[in-house]
Image (cartoon, coloured by chain):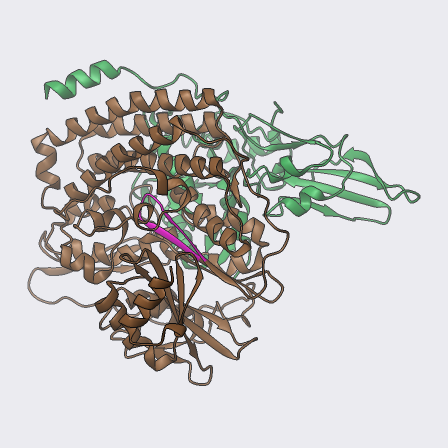
Amino acid sequence: MFRIISKSLKTGVLTEVSPPAAQASFGFPVIDFRRCTACEECVRSCPTGAIYAEAPEPGRTTLSLSYASCIQCRECVNGCPEQAIGVSTDVEIAAYNRQQLEQTASFDIDPATGRNAFRQVEVQPGPSLSESAARLRARIRGRLGRSLHVRQVDAGSCNACELEITATMNPFYDLERFGIHLVASPRHADLLLVTGPVTRNMEIALRRTYEAAPEPRVVVAVGACGCSGGIFGEGTYAAVGGVDRVLPVDVYIPGCPPRPQAILNGLLVAMGVREARVRAVQK
Amino acid sequence: MTSNVATVAAALQIADSAVREVRAGELLLDVNTVALRVAADRIVSGLDGRLFSLFASDERSTTGRFLVHHLWLLPRLRTFLRVTAPVDPAKSSFPSITTTHTAANWFEREVMDVFGLKPEGHPNPTRVALHDDWPDGVWTLRKDFADNTEVPRVPGDFHPFRPVTGEGVFQVPVGPVHAGVIEPGHFRFGVAGEPVLYLQLRLFYVHKGTEKRFERLPWRHGLLLAESISGDTAVGHSLAYAHAIERLAGVTVPARARGLRVVLLELERIYNHTADIGAIATDVAFTVPASRAQALREGLVRLQDQLFGTRLLRGTIALGGVKRDLSPEACDVLGAHLRVFEREFDDLITLLIDAGTFTDRVDGTGILSNQAARDLGIVGIAARASGVDGDLRRDHPHDAYDGLRFEVPIEDGGDVRARLMVRAREVEQSLVILHQVLRAMPDSPLAAPIPKELPARSSALGWAEAWRGPCTHWIATDDRGEIARVKVTDPSFLNWPGLVHAVPGNIVPDFPVINKSFNLSYSGNDR
């Protein structure tokens, strides 16, 4: 007993005031489209199709990068012949829909040389971040206050996301000080924290868990798989894909797996305490 | 090494020429289907073989047959032995070895589920991998099944769990969505009051079609998929995958990379063991050590982030080597952190085992007997806690383990405490290993070049002793040198039946701590 008390006193308080964003050495890839020649080397090196090229009309090509499917493997960063892909240290990324996690640039193809010249970064269709934030706040207004009860559902994850969700409860991050509690039953939950490419075998269980939760039942999709199916893909015989294929998703937390501070940030976005940020800042 | 061929041939009472050594540590024996059972019996009785995996492959496009593979580990000969037998598609059945070799049970039923090949003589030929709402005749790993096939759900009753009858006897259903932050699976307890009479499992909720996915991805990208087989074993599985590709391509990994791979694998072992020890404390509501263990684990994970740019060691293994180096300063930082960690870890273990309230809960809880562990073919920490010796790092060394001195801790209790103590002693050994490697890190390139193409119609086995136990990957290529089949065996697949045997006789409230002491991966099992 004496040993336990003395150990507790010696250890002191480990909880950090603000989770250290600076220590993350790799967040997401950032493409400098001005240096990019749309050679598509990154498209070929990307294992999940997070970077893809399209030809919307003759003489025009577009290159898109979606953080929703990025597994942060850095293959594109190392493989870019123009060194146009940098890394961000920023991990506190979240969004209200999949499109907001995507960035598209268009290029004009010079008919004489066949080379691509950067034209512009396209504006993503759909609501802006502040419009989405306002909509979410209106939906949960007054119901949650500063308390959030969370039911975590693994709908097919590889368990890396679970490791990081568990880490948010450790003494360093201490999720509970933000009024966030993980509860045992969906009947007690305001929010479902869902991971994994929803598998065929978990689809029904996930729907039932959602139906068991009381309104406003916010849904947060965690990880590349939860946001888009990740490396397991979408629409295979075993994996349905991203959580939004099954349930309406309010907040997306990308990453493979997202770091604890990214998960914390995403939960605060879902509470309406913070507004989502989707552009990573380059180192 | 030809002596191995002769020994195996003698034990099996066959001609030497029937056994081939395809690569170092990898023997191959082709038999006809009827000889499978005799071969299995003689491998166990004459060579102390342990069944490590059992699977099928679809070779109809080339030979017109399926192949059934039995993968045995021959500890005395320090080699693997793969026994293959052709299966005629018209008959679609192969002899089961489950009645004499229990470890084959789930494997054979999985072959039945995904290849439509019936294990003849299996005592319980019901589904294991497919859930009840899958229609019959959907054989997902056959080559003529496209991975984007939409499989309809079949309505109807779920196949019943074993009933319990009697006064005060009832069933407790748990899952697939659990109360904590853990993976999904369904447990059905038959209980008489508090004590559990039996436990039944229904897994495969997180079946993602991973083995089929490997066949669709370029083999270079397969490495990243291997990291997602079980997120807590990213290094173990990517290493097993890389080993198989390197053996296929005939690539030798440079010395520095071999050392760094040991560093990565041991760090993964330490952070998982530390987290598990904390989780065992959590499950008996002993909060101070639980919190200490979480803090120690977070410290390690942050250090990994600082050194390699990744918290859970993803993206560190390369085909042919490693992707990240450790500078001499980084080695010093790591060494210094580990010395502090060692003291703190000792304190943690002392806190736990000096507390009578804690040992009361873990001593004699969830016993897996030595006999049961042997019969079921249990591997890894669960086996070593039940007195079954075996560790690929020592017996079939990969990477730099051959030149390292370390012990393989064995406990005899088979209970939660034994599994906890195996972990604690393995952490000590991992520290011994890490200090050895860090002291003498050889100088060499980080990775050997990998050829653009793999040899066509070839296959190789890769293995690694990850923290939970051995991970094996068997990779076969087609006639274009692309992946034709990857068979992934996670130690969890072999060990789940062990949990079923360890729980009965205990009380329901002790189930979480017993489950945690095994800490098996659902994702690794279900793939």
Q: Quadrant of the N terminus of chain B?
A: bottom left
Point 8% across, 66% down: residue: B166
Q: Nearer the viewer, residue A221 or A15?
A: A15
Name the spot of residue B134 as percent of width and height, x first: 42, 69
- Please state the extent of the stretch shown in magenta in the rendering: B461-473
| Chain ID, green in image | A
Q: Is residue B310 visible?
A: yes
The one of B448 and A229 positioned closer to us in this rendering: B448
Does B89 sit above or below residue B238? below
Instruction: Tell me if residue B485 can be seen.
Output: no
- Left or right, residue B271 beside residue B253: left
Q: Position of residue B504 (x, y in %)?
A: 13, 56
- Residue found at the far bottom of this picture: B90
Classify residue B322 as left or right of residue B39: right
Q: Along the line of sight, which residue is nearer the eye, A266 or B240?
A: B240
Query: Is A168 placed above or below B261 here?
Result: above
For residue B91, side relative to residue A137 (left or right): left
Q: Magenta: predominant secondary structure element?
A: strand
Based on the picture, tell me whether residue B50 belongs to the magenta stretch: no
Residue B76 pos. (x, y %): 26, 57
Q: Residue at x 36, y 28 (%)?
A: B300
Q: Residue at x 42, y 50 (%)?
A: A155
State which chain is coloured brown. B
Residue nearer the viewer, B523 or B244: B244
